[in-house]
Image: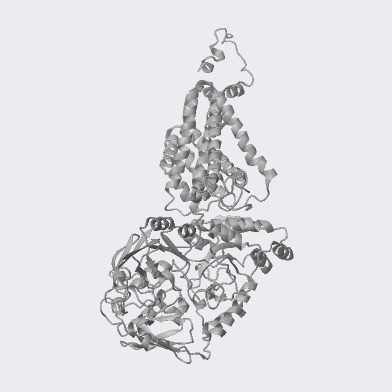
């Protein structure tokens, strides 16, 4: 706990606070680096990105190639590093290629969630009144929908393409961020700097986008990293049930395909599962670090 | 602070495992990732939407006559498929439980087709003939039969003892009514299309009149295809397909009577003590236990809850073969003739080039597919006529696995640099699609797998108006005679949008149609066979479909099961001769 309480402002020999002090350079970065778990998360993420996007370039051009007998365990004679799956594909290569599908879906879903959630939350929080009531009822409607079922219905209806999966995840996950943004807007719209902007005649649009939104960004960015983690889990859940792109196997889809032979073929289930676990873990740790970096008041909470 | 972080990580881990567990729970009902599932789950005919083209060719002179064989002195065992394996008095009785993955709605095979209806129906209903495992007709309700010299009528003598469960005699009126019911309701129109009526009224000497010779007729008299249903029960003006007596208070004439029917749960039969064939059935009781999936059947067989169940190859069969409590038979179901194949859409620009289609076949590695998908248990199959059929040509031209030949054909067609190909499958077909993606990648073909969630969606996607599917994986059944189950996939006039298992490739060769029609009228087995050889050669040269294999339907059973249903119709034949060894 020591490193939290001993922040610079707590020093007794601190400079006179009434004098304007420029913030120390890279303060946020330093705070992030001080959070060792977050650094671990970031290193993990870099590793995952290298495995997903860079290694496959050097390894094979036929990611579906059947290279050996099916169900070869790692360490078996003639088996590749991580063994083979139910077809005889190299588990390592399929898992490597699966990352881009998973991350693509999760990334776009996170963008969509933040886009919808922040817009609706901003409008509700800023305008208040009936706009707020209407938008919040609308939000609550999506909040009480059984998320996984609703997503399954959407994907099953419109075929499991990347677009529909992103839309499905986006449509059911935005209410959280909408409420968060609304709360921030409600709080900030009564602060001095917003009143000042109103006083000099700034339009609503300008105040929302240029005045308040930048000040809510820290909260949104921190939340986004967590949302992306949740989106990965969501994608994995859908794909596990077979709702995914069978030509570009995501980790969840691959895990689902291998589950029938789970007992005899644990490695083909374990490795994609571990990739999901480590990716979500790293995003969560990074989110924690960003919290520290952006939001000094919440530091340590 | 740090401990909180670890708490968070732990909560995350917990969430991951929770989701995994939640997903795992859905295993039973969901077929999406059943990678070791049988190669085919599109059990065709189930939907009742199948439609066929009738073979209509102007009268041709019929020449051949087939005489009924049963000799009077052998009458006592002529009706048995296994006269040499009859239980002693002490060995009779007992209960057999069949584990069935799926739901059986009714038992009337005269109004719809399908493995489920026929399996349940053939125990409660009898038919005019049965068929042995040697493709020979065996007397059942009809004790004698003869085809007229001109092929335009078939005379039948019904077993004088033949009667329904309610004691009413079976007469020509019932035969006539059953055929008319099938003509009006059954999806397999060619079975009885040439039949104009049955003479004989309330007697036991019937004449089936035909407008043209119809060699497939005797096969169509099989238990599954034409159960003889009681006219006095059903002829009450109600809609036959939804008639209440199809599954309640069922009156048939078969070896068993239905005493309990909970759709989706159980059908319980007890022996028909008044059965018209002497000493049959050997069992006291027969139970069909309906369960949600094949895994439950496997489990039930292993625990001994079920005595018998089917299976289509793969690890389950290997496991059963290695289980000392179970025996496995690969006999039976030959008339089903299930042939998994890749359906190519000839309306597609790329696939309209025959060289591309031939190249795709050359690039198919049967051994690899068979090993991965079926644990090596399917037979190689090179034509659309099932390899146990008398009309199958074992020397038909087959496209051997040859990547160089495939590449040369693609180069020749101008697709040497490869192309993309969409491949539509239901979840059960994903493994095959993945294997093809791997195999065809070697000739530069990039397969885009598109998974459709279920059978109705698959129908919509592949036979819907203006469909742009390129390749799909399906499996068609021969149903005993090429006229019933083969012609439909190639006839020009069976290119029908919206109809499952029609000519889904949109293939048309009028010369072929003429040969198939001629074969449908030909009584001479040798001439008929030659016509089918010629037809399959034409089809193989044109490659509207790529035949993957001859799917073997296995019977898994407890070692005490004697006389399992091993005729050409397998489970869809009567189980009257089954008994339990002590």
Residue A191 visible in rendering: no
Expressed as whole percent of the image width and height from the top left, the position of residue A213 reads 55, 30
Q: Position of residue B118 (x, y in %)?
A: 40, 70
Q: Nearer the viewer, residue B303 or B235?
A: B303
In this view, the residue farthest toward the top is A13
Is residue A40 in sight in this rendering? yes
Q: Quadrant of residue A144?
A: top left
Colour approach in the figure = one colour
Answer left or right for B339 relative to B106.
right
**Rendered view: B12 above or below B50:** above
Residue B267 versus residue B489: which sits nearer the camera?
A: B267
Query: Horizontal placement of B512 versus B454: left or right?
Result: right
Quadrant of the image containing the C terminus of chain B: bottom left
**Is A68 in front, or is B251?**
A68
Q: Residue at x 35, y 74 (%)?
A: B86
Q: How many marks?
A: 0
């Amino acid at each position: 706990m020591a490193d939290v309480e001993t922040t610079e402002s707590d020093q007794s020999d601190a400079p006179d606070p009434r004098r304007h002090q420029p913030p120390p350079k890279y303060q946020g970065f330093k705070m992030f680096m001080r959070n060792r778990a977050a650094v671990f998360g970031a290193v993990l993420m870099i590793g995952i990105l290298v495995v997903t996007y860079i290694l496959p370039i050097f390894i094979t051009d036929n990611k579906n190639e059947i290279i050996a007998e099916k169900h070869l365990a790692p360490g078996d004679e003639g088996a590749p590093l991580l063994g083979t799956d139910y077809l005889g594909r190299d588990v390592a290569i399929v898992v490597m290629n699966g990352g881009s599908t998973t991350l693509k879906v999760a990334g776009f879903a996170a963008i969509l969630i933040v886009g919808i959630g922040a817009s609706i939350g901003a409008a509700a929080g800023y305008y208040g009144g009936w706009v707020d009531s209407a938008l919040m009822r609308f939000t609550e409607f999506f909040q009480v929908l059984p998320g996984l079922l609703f997503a399954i219905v959407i994907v099953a209806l419109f075929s499991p393409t990347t677009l529909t999966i992103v839309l499905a995840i986006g449509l059911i996950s935005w209410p959280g961020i909408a409420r968060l943004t609304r709360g921030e807007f409600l709080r900030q719209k009564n602060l001095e700097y917003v009143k000042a902007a109103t006083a000099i005649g700034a339009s609503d649009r300008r105040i929302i986008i240029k005045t308040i939104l930048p000040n809510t960004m820290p909260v949104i960015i921190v939340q986004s990293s967590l949302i992306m983690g949740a989106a990965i889990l969501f994608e994995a859940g859908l794909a596990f049930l077979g709702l995914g792109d069978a030509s570009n196997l995501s980790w969840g889809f691959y895990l689902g395909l291998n589950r029938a032979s789970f007992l005899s073929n644990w490695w083909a289930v374990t490795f994609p599962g571990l990739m999901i676990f480590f990716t979500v873990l790293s995003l969560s740790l990074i989110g924690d670090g960003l919290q520290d970096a952006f939001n000094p008041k919440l530091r340590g909470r | 602070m740090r401990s909180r972080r670890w708490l968070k990580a732990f909560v995350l881990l917990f969430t991951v495992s929770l989701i995994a567990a939640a997903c795992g729970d859905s295993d039973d009902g969901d077929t999406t990732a059943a990678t070791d599932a049988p190669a085919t789950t599109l059990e065709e005919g189930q939907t009742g939407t199948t439609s066929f083209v009738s073979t209509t060719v102007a009268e041709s002179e019929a020449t051949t006559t087939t005489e009924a064989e049963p000799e009077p002195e052998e009458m006592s065992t002529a009706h048995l498929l296994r006269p040499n394996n009859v239980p002693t008095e002490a060995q009779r009785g007992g209960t057999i439980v069949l584990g069935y993955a799926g739901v059986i709605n009714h038992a009337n095979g005269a109004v719809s087709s399908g493995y489920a209806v026929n399996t349940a129906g053939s125990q409660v209903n009898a038919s005019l003939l049965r068929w042995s495992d040697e493709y020979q007709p065996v007397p059942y309700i009809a004790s004698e039969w003869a085809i007229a010299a001109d092929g335009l009528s078939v005379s039948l003598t019904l077993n004088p003892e033949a009667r329904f469960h309610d004691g009413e005699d079976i007469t020509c009126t019932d035969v006539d009514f059953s055929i008319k019911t099938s003509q009006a309701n059954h999806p397999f129109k060619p079975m009885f299309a040439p039949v104009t009526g049955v003479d004989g009224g309330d007697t036991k000497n019937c004449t089936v009149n035909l407008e043209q010779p119809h060699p497939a007729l005797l096969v169509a008299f099989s238990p599954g295809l034409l159960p003889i249903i009681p006219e006095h029960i059903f002829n009450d003006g109600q809609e036959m397909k939804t008639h209440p007596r199809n599954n309640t208070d069922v009156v048939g004439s078969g070896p068993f009577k239905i005493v309990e029917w909970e759709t989706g749960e159980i059908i319980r039969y007890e022996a028909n003590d008044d059965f018209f064939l002497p000493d049959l059935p050997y069992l006291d009781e027969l139970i069909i236990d309906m369960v949600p999936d094949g895994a439950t059947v496997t489990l039930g067989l292993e625990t001994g809850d079920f005595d018998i169940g089917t299976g289509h190859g793969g690890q389950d069969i290997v496991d059963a073969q290695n289980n000392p409590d179970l025996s496995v038979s690969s006999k039976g179901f030959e008339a089903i003739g299930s042939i998994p194949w890749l359906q190519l859409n000839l309306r597609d620009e790329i696939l309209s080039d025959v060289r591309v289609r031939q190249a795709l076949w050359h690039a198919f590695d049967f051994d690899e597919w068979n090993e991965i998908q079926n644990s090596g248990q399917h037979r190689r199959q090179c034509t659309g006529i099932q390899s146990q059929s008398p009309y199958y040509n074992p020397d038909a031209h087959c496209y051997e696995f040859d990547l160089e030949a495939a590449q040369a054909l693609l180069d020749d067609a101008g697709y040497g640099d490869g192309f993309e190909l969409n491949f539509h499958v239901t979840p059960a077909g994903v493994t095959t699609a993945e294997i093809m993606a791997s195999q065809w990648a070697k000739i530069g073909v990039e397969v885009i797998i598109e998974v459709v969630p279920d059978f109705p969606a698959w129908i919509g996607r592949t036979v819907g108006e203006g469909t742009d599917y390129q390749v799909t994986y399906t499996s068609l059944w021969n149903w005993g005679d090429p006229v019933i189950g083969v012609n439909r996939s190639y006839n020009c006039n069976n290119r029908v949008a919206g109809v499952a298992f029609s000519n889904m490739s949109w293939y048309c060769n009028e010369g072929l149609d003429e040969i198939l029609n001629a074969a449908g009228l030909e009584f001479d087995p040798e001439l008929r066979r030659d016509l089918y050889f010629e037809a399959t050669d034409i089809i193989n040269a044109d490659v509207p479909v790529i035949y993957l294999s001859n799917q073997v339907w296995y019977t898994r059973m407890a070692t005490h099961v004697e006389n399992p249903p091993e005729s050409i119709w397998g489970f869809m034949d009567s189980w009257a001769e089954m008994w339990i060894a002590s």
